[in-house]
Image: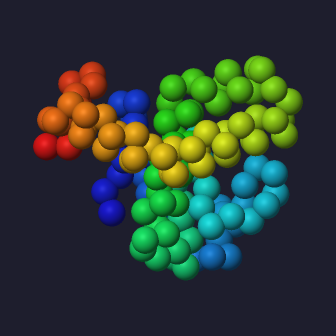
């Protein structure tokens, strides 16, 4: 798999065994995937297969986008730790569930690819 480029930075995507310690999030909960803002690596359990893999990668990419945009820092300043985690998860869930539908709706409405900041999709 190729890395993701988000906010001009390269984020690695690694498949790891389900018992890998990197699948433990900052709350101490074991997950099927995590996003590490320091090393800029998304890790996804080998047990996750398509089509769930695509959804999980989109969710984790949303976390990476929050880091790159500074949103995680804003959430940290505006909420207590548990509130920050909940807000980040809610936003990532929204992206995984609705992001592609929103982009497709705009492409359909325009009748052409959508272009933002010199990046076009839907062609």
Tell me if residue 49 comes above or below residue 66 in the rendering.
below
Q: Is residue 33 left or right of residue 65?
A: right
Q: Residue at x 65, y 71 (%)?
A: 20
Q: Quadrant of residue 5?
A: top left
Indicate whether 64 appears above or below 3: above
Q: Which quarter of the rendered picture does the C terminus lie within?
A: top left
In percent of the image, x 81 and y 26: which residue is there?
A: 79
Residue 94, position in %: x, y? 57, 44
Colour setting: rainbow
Quadrant, the N terminus: bottom left
Q: Position of residue 99 (x, y in %)?
A: 44, 43
Q: Residue furthest front?
A: 109
> Does 47 appear above or below 94?
below
Q: Is residue 119 left or right of residue 63?
A: left
- In the rendered image, residue 46, in percent from the top left (x then y), is placed at 52, 76
Residue 121 in view of the camera: no
């Amino acid at each position: 798999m190729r890395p993701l480029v988000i906010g001009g930075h390269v984020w690695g995507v690694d498949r790891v065994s389900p018992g890998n310690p990197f699948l433990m999030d900052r709350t101490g909960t074991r997950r099927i995937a995590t996003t590490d803002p320091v090393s800029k690596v998304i890790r996804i359990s080998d047990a996750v297969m398509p089509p769930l893999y695509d959804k999980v990668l989109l969710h984790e990419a949303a976390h990476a986008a929050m880091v790159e945009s500074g949103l995680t820092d804003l959430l940290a300043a505006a909420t207590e730790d548990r509130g920050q985690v909940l807000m980040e998860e809610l936003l990532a869930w929204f992206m995984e569930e609705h992001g592609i539908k929103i982009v497709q709706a705009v492409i359909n409405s325009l009748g052409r690819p959508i272009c933002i900041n010199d990046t076009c999709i839907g062609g």
